[in-house]
Amino acid sequence: MSDTRIKEILYRNVFDSRGVETLEIDLRTRGGGYARVAAPFGAPGSRGEFEAPAYAPEGLAAMPALLDREIIPALVGLDANEQEKIDDLLVQIDGSTNFERIGGNTSSVLSIAVARAAADTKKIPLYKHLQGDTVFTLPTPLGNVIGGGAHSLGPAPDMQEHMVLPIGCKSVRQAIEINLKVHKEAGRLLEKRDIGFAGGMDDEDAWAANLNDVQALEVIEEAKKRIEDETGISIRMGLDLAADRLWNSIKNVYRYEREGIERSAAQQLEFVQSLMDRFDLVYVEDAFNSNDYDSFATLTSNAPSNCIICADDIYASNSLRTLVGINKKSAHAMIIKPNQVGTITGARRTALLAQSHGIDIIISNRSGETPDVSIADLGVAWNAIAIKAGVRGGGRIIKLNELIRIEQTEVNIQLADLNSLKI
Ligand code: PEP
Ligand code: CA
């Protein structure tokens, strides 16, 4: 049996896809296992209010002292195979309830590096290391086609992500290809629809266009119809409103800057429902602010049976917040982002809690990304129904390509059953 005990941990600051400094870890085991993992980062204005802070309150500058004096000495010598023990130790070292002292990026990057190095020592893929011989499924990629909100500059749509989801593909490779085709076709249409369009992209490599949200959906609708005709694959549309950024808590309204419109919670509900009807949306994420479980619940109970209402910032991958949502029936599905909660074990516990109550999970990247592909493995190991990893661009396609490799290795693997979708 190879020796999975941790031999060495090195760290450095590198830059993410947005050019923001982030923490990178190299972790080696005595048995020759190696992992290099850098932490992704949400955008200011998009990161959830309830997720773990990324680093210590003093920022990255405070990390060397914490890593050198407290964290690395406590981890070296431990068995990287004992993920829960190490993750629980990280919680203990931090000493708060939400990684307020050492940061969720710090702990999650260490947690993922531990798992990857253990898998590497044993010469098995990360998803197998995490889940043994479970029957794995591949998440369907949700493709972000036109961006907006906190992920873009200038006169973009107010909502953050205007997406597509291919339905009934025979392989993940085909689903990835369909999303790429829609993205490309939408780019061609934008050349005509947006006079100043010069092929610019937002933080997540979705198109940056001078359109409002309805116009963005119209462009995607036309693009996806063309690709449906070309390929015979059915494609549906979705939104991440990232509504915390629209919410004005002083006036109690959702403010759509671009359109100069303010909507009360009731008007927001009506507006979102009208978009669901008009565009036959299959997916609606964060339609309300992160304190409004009740509006989420109303939207969920009113939604047609073939539309997934998804909770991201409101649940923040946090089991206590998720439990409140489960009891209130606030969503059919939830986003899991490991650095929102700080460890693989924390994210896994939340995912299991959700799934045991019939809530599907969707694994997600962050807007500031790194070359780490682990969310592809986590999505497979944990039976996520979908993955948000963009459509193209270095830090995004690398994760989608990892799913293609897993599909090649696991000959009997299927795309996850979108069981929230009664279609
Ligand atoms: C999101 O809101 O789902 C997202 C990926 O954005 P960020 O990483 O900026 O929070
Ligand atoms: Ca989101």
Image (cartoon, helix red, strand yellow):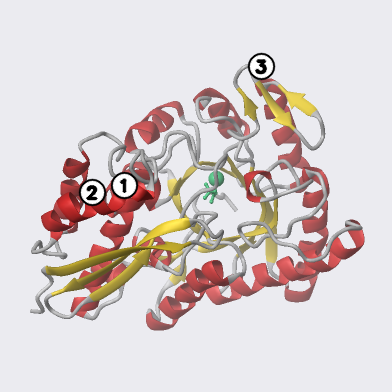
Q: Which mark is residue 293?
A: none
How many numbered discs sit on the rendered protein?
Answer: 3
State the image coordinates of residue 405 (x, y, percent, origin top left). 44, 80
Residue designated by label 3: 251
Q: Label 1 neighbourhood size at 10 Å, few (<14), some (14-19), many (20+)?
A: few
Residue 273 image offset from top left, x and y in percent: 71, 34
Label 2 element class? helix
Residue 404, position as x, y percentages in the image: 49, 77
Q: Position of 90 compared to 409: left or right?
A: left
> 344 or 103, which lies in front?
103
Asked whether residue 16 is in view, the answer is yes
Q: In the orientation shown, which residue stands out farthest toward the top?
A: 251
Is 163 placed left or right of 12 in the picture?
Answer: right
The residue type indicated by label 3 comes to Lys
Residue 130 in view = no
Q: Which residue is mark 2?
A: 66
User: Which type of secondary structure does the marked residue at label 1 adopt?
Assistant: helix
Measure how far apart labels 1 and 3 are at the Cα level: 37 Å
Q: Is residue 32 left or right of residue 63?
A: left
Q: Pointers 2 and 1 in contact (CB under 8 A)?
A: yes
